[in-house]
Amino acid sequence: MEKNRRLHLLGLMFDGIASGMMLMALPWFILKQGNNGMFLAVVTLACTVMSFVLTPFVATAIDRCPRKHILALTQLVQVLAASCIVIGGMMTNSSQLGSAHSAVSVWILAFCLVSFWLASDIAWATNGAFTQELYKPSEYGRVSSQQEIVMQITTLSAGGMGVWLLEVWSMEEFAQLTGALAFVA
């Protein structure tokens, strides 16, 4: 069981890094592209409302569907969202590619923000149920504490690192990294 716990925590770590980087970097990049403060506010409000509305449906799905499949699906959504940024960047003017100020559409970025936001919500809820499936009740407290520590450290530190990387890399390069991390998770 110790090996399973290490693998489980390692998967959470990679998920936390990918999610933390994108959930911090996408709003940052949207704001850097111009006067998009109101647009970003509306997108994040929509994310919050969708999270609230979808919660009962997600909870039902978690109870009825294999949790491993749900977690794999959330990672697939994150990989595909990151791929949308890469493809969107490739479709922009070739003179802007590789620039730290590429012109990926704010609509593509908003779509990816919503995708990462909802996938992270679903993954977090599924992870709690998955913990009950994998471990004995006597282990819940210890495992839940370890999971919380891993997620807080990786999400927060990766978010800060993500904003720093956006100053050095293009959004497309950044999306390739986070897509790879989501795939590994």
Image (tube, rainbow, N blue to C red):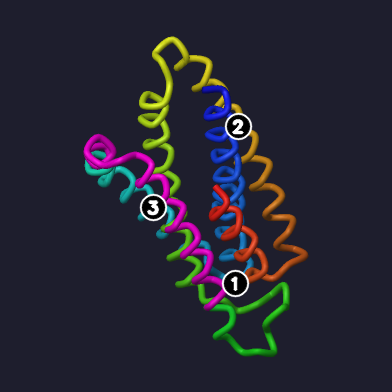
The answer to whether marks 3 and 2 mark residues whose Cβ atoms lie closer than 8 Å is no
| Residue of label 2 | 150
Q: Amino acid at mark 3?
A: Leu
Prevalent SS, magenta region: helix
Residue 127: percent from left, percent from top: 42, 34
Give coordinates of residue 88: x percent, y percent.
53, 78
State the separation of the CA atoms marked 1 and 3: 33 Å
37 left or right of 71? right
Give the quarter of the image for residue 153. top right
What label sits on residue 34 in the rendered view?
1
The label nearer to you, 2 versus 1, is: 2
Query: Mark 3 Cα within 10 Å, few/some/many (few <14, many 20+)?
Result: some
Dot 3 or dot 2: first in sequence order is 3
Q: Amino acid at mark 2?
A: Val
As displayed, is residue 1 above or below residue 93?
above
Dot 1: few (<14), some (14–19), or many (≥20) neighbours within 10 Å?
Answer: few
Magenta stretch, residue numbers: 59-87
Q: Nearer the viewer, residue 39 or 4?
A: 4
Q: Residue at x 52, y 30 (%)?
A: 4
Point out which mark residue 73 bears.
Answer: 3
Residue at 64 percent across and 69 percent down: it is 171
Res. 27 image quadrant: bottom right
Residue 86 falls inside the magenta stretch: yes
Mark 2: give few (<14), some (14-19) or many (20+) Cα within 10 Å.
Answer: some
Disc 1 versus disc 3: nearer the observer: 3
- Which amino acid is tagged 1? Gly
Residue 39 visible, this orientation: no
